[in-house]
Amino acid sequence: MSTSSLIVFLILGTCSSLATAKDSQSHEVQFGNSWDAEVQADFNEAITLLHSFEYPETSNRFQNIIIERDPGCAMAYWGKAMSLWHPLWAPPSGL
């Protein structure tokens, strides 16, 4: 495993440990933060889609948060980037 892959796995492991399932029947991911409830719900849905490998819809959801809801949301930029980088399926090219 390369150093960059190890770093990605450590970061994702840390982020995953911060997330909790909403209930035993739902696969929705919850991240605590200081955004208003409406942005929080959109962010949680986008993270859930990201963890389900729904990259195009994930990208759209994070883009909506960045443009229309909270342009200062750094985690939405991170989510947008993660929706464009698929290290499990194909290595990045030309980055």
Image (cartoon, rainbow, N blue to C red):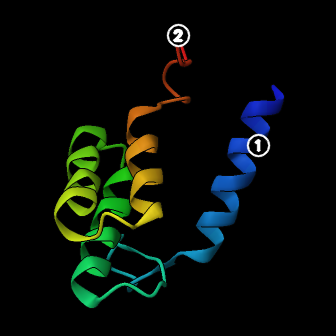
- Secondary structure of the residue carrying numbered label 2: loop
Which is more toward the observer, 43 or 69?
69
Picture residue at 52% right of the left edge, 10% below the top: 94
Quarter of the picture containing the N terminus is top right
> Dot 2 corresponds to which residue?
94
**How many angstroms separate mark 2 from mark 1 (CA)?**
20 Å
> Dot 1 corresponds to which residue?
7
Residue 43, image x and y in percent? 32, 69
- Tell me if mark 1 has few (under 14), some (14-19) or many (20+) residues whose alpha carbon lies within 10 angstroms of its own: few
Report whether 47 appears left or right of 38: right
Extreme residue in the front direction: 72
Residue 28, image x and y in percent? 35, 72
Picture residue at 38% right of the left edge, 61% below the top: 47
Residue 60, image x and y in percent? 20, 47
Picture residue at 29% right of the left edge, 55% below the top: 62
- Secondary structure of the residue carrying numbered label 1: helix
Residue 82, image x and y in percent? 46, 43
Which is more toward the observer, 64 or 46?
64
**Badge count:** 2
